[in-house]
Image (cartoon, rainbow, N blue to C red):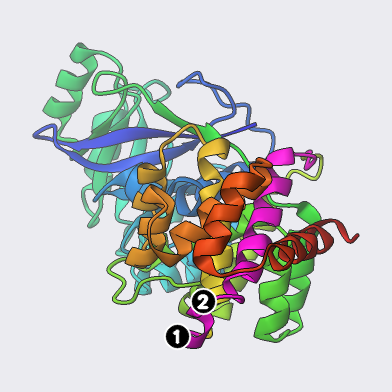
Amino acid sequence: MEYMIGRQAIVSRTEEVVAYELLFRTTQSPAWADVQDDVQATSNTIMHALSGFGTKSVMGRHRGFVNVDAELLMSDALEILPPSLFGLELLETMDITPQVIDRCRELKAKGYVLALDDHTYDPRFNELYDGVVSVVKIDMLETDLNALPAAMERLREYPVKLLAEKVDTTERYQECQRLGFDLFQGYVFSQPSVMKKRRWDGSASVIFKLMQQLTDDADLDEVERTIKESPPLVYKLLVLVNSISMGLRSKISSLRHAIVMIGLRQLRRWVQLAVFATDEDTCLNDPVMDLAAVRAVFLEELVKLTPLVRKDRHAPDEGYMIGILSILTKVFDISMEEILGNLHLPDEAIDALLRREGDYGRLLSLVELVENLEFEEAAERLEALEIPLLSVLDCQKKAYSWRFGV
């Protein structure tokens, strides 16, 4: 399984990239997506951008537009998206009811940029044209070109930018320039590019359990324990915090720290989106996930045997986080440097993960030796760390017991 997300550039009249449209993709074909459910497609796109790849990797410094239907528009989960980074494209299938208009005004007031997708002028949209929607996208393959100048003249009465989409030839681009479009999107500039990673889903049961706990105002300890049941969710949460909290002043030192930084309200929104995006048929019998879960708890328990705990009571939590992250090069087809580029970690965590240096790095190396049954070299490391072998094996037993209930 793989994460996939498409993106296509939106350019200005001077052909500078000003934004991207983020596209749901299920195949490596840039032009094809098997969309069977609009809400699930958009939710997957958002989840992949926020906590699969990270917004920096997907969009750089530009805004990303995502398609939303009425159900997602009205959902509080939508507000997990930082207004400074995302725009919302209202699908052409959406009924423009008074409730939808009020919701659009609310989102506009919160800083979101709204666009009408595949649109033709319609007086029923006047309330949205007038200061609520910022961009009107016109499909150049579906629009009657003879009626286009008159429709554009009507739209020019409002404070909106007009975007010509599906501009697929140089001749059509020149015609759109002549007509006075402000923005352009289409194959003449770039085909949609598809980004992919191996997909490592969280358990649907864990996601639903977490949603119930957040609905019931469960305490932080309970929420943290549930997230730990799914190693993929740990990594996704760390990427999420970095995605929606640009310019973090403090570095993420543990899973609990990440939960506190994002806050339970934003976490609830994220989980709601995860529910929308979940494929209940996802197969979770992945040995790599088992390895990650065991290694994380193994390292967490080992840290408790060292002076690290006397220096920082949160050190076991940091050990758990390092254990999870250390597996990800086996999961994604990217380097550890690229993985860490999506996160905001303390220097000691980076030293451990990149170079196996520092206190955490030495413990991580020890865990890897034990996993590989290299006990002779492990014994030498243990002597230097002044940790009894029986204590290490007890830590490993606890890790297996936690993961498999044995």
* Disc marking residue 372: none
Residue at 39%, 20% (x, y): give it: 141
Decide whether residue 204 is among the magenta residues: no
* Residue furthest left in the image: 14
x and y percentages locating residue 138 in the rendered image: 35, 34
- Marks 2 and 1 sit apart, C-alpha to C-alpha, by 8 Å
Residue at 75%, 52% (x, y): give it: 203
Residue at 37%, 49% (x, y): give it: 355
CB atoms of marks 2 and 1 within 8 Å? yes
Residue located beneath label 1 in the image: 311
Q: In the displayed structure, does residue 139 sit left or right of residue 362?
A: left
Is residue 240 visible from the viewing direction of this image?
A: no
* Disc marking residue 315: 2
Task: Name the residue type under label 2.
Answer: Ala
* Magenta residues (range): 283-312
Residue nearest the viewer, comparing 178 with 375: 375
Q: In the displayed structure, does residue 51 sit left or right of residue 182?
A: right
Main SS of the magenta part reads: helix
Residue nearest the viewer, comparing 118 with 265: 265
